[in-house]
Amino acid sequence: HQLKTPLTSLSLIVELMQQYTEKPELKQLTEQMLNQTDHLRSLVISLLNLSRMDAGILQFIPKEIIIEELLFSAAEPILPVLKEKQQTFQMQGNLDCSLFCDIGWTIEGIGNILKNCSEHTPNKGSILVSVFQNPIYTEIQIEDNGEGFTPVELPHLFERFYKGKHSAKDSIGIGLALSKSIIERQNGEIRAENRMEGGARFRIKFYKI
């Protein structure tokens, strides 16, 4: 709360400034301030979640959910970006099967991976999610047709604070690390690889208990 409360107050102040100014240049500046404050809040929350996970104090509450619904919820925050970059998002496979997981945390974990794929995929590129299920595990594959990973990047992708060659300027390298922790805390595993056709692929497996 010592970090989140001041950031929330700052966002409210900037929003009030927007309402009380009529000058276009000031409105533009306050919009930029609000965007940076929101970004800072997101980073603080992610860092706090990683710390709580390390300490073992985050509680996971498993519930059953249809995978198609889970994936739609994970993709929802990046839909405006996909539209802006004219990227296609498709799902295929056993979408009507169910997964027993902590819904909120799993949505965040998968959402981070989708965001990463979108950032590293060019305009008019594509992101494909495939779902497979067998008696042992449920697998979710997320792949794109971007530049893929370099041999140097692959061993370090899920390390916290690691930034690859094509990472966004404002990235601090915690999204994939958080996704890995969320998945592994739920009897799962994740790995990354390059597609033979070009682009990246993330393979997530949730093992049945």
Image: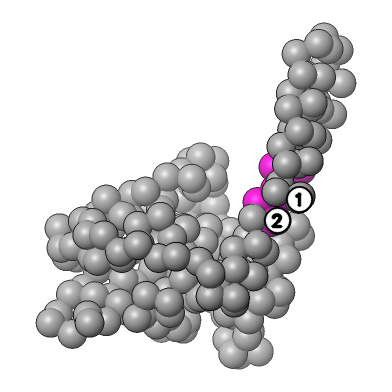
The color scheme shown is: one colour
Residue 183 figure quarter: bottom left
Residue at 75%, 57% (x, y): give it. Answer: 170
Q: Amino acid at mark 2?
A: Val
> Residue 186 location, x and y as percent?
37, 75
- Using the image as rendered, state which of residue 185 and residue 79 is in the foreground: 185
Q: Is residue 16 left or right of residue 117?
A: right
Secondary structure of the magenta portion, mostly?
Answer: helix
The x, y position of residue 11, in whole percent, is 74, 33
Q: Which mark is residue 44?
A: 2
Residue at label 1?
A: 3
Callout 1: SS: loop
Q: Name the quadrant of the C terminus.
A: bottom left
Q: Which residues are magenta?
A: 36-44
Question: Is residue 206 rendered to the left or right of residue 142?
Answer: left
Judging depth in this view, the residue of 110 and 196 nearest the camera is 110
Q: Does the image show residue 167?
A: no
Seen in the image, is 48 located left or right of residue 186? Answer: right
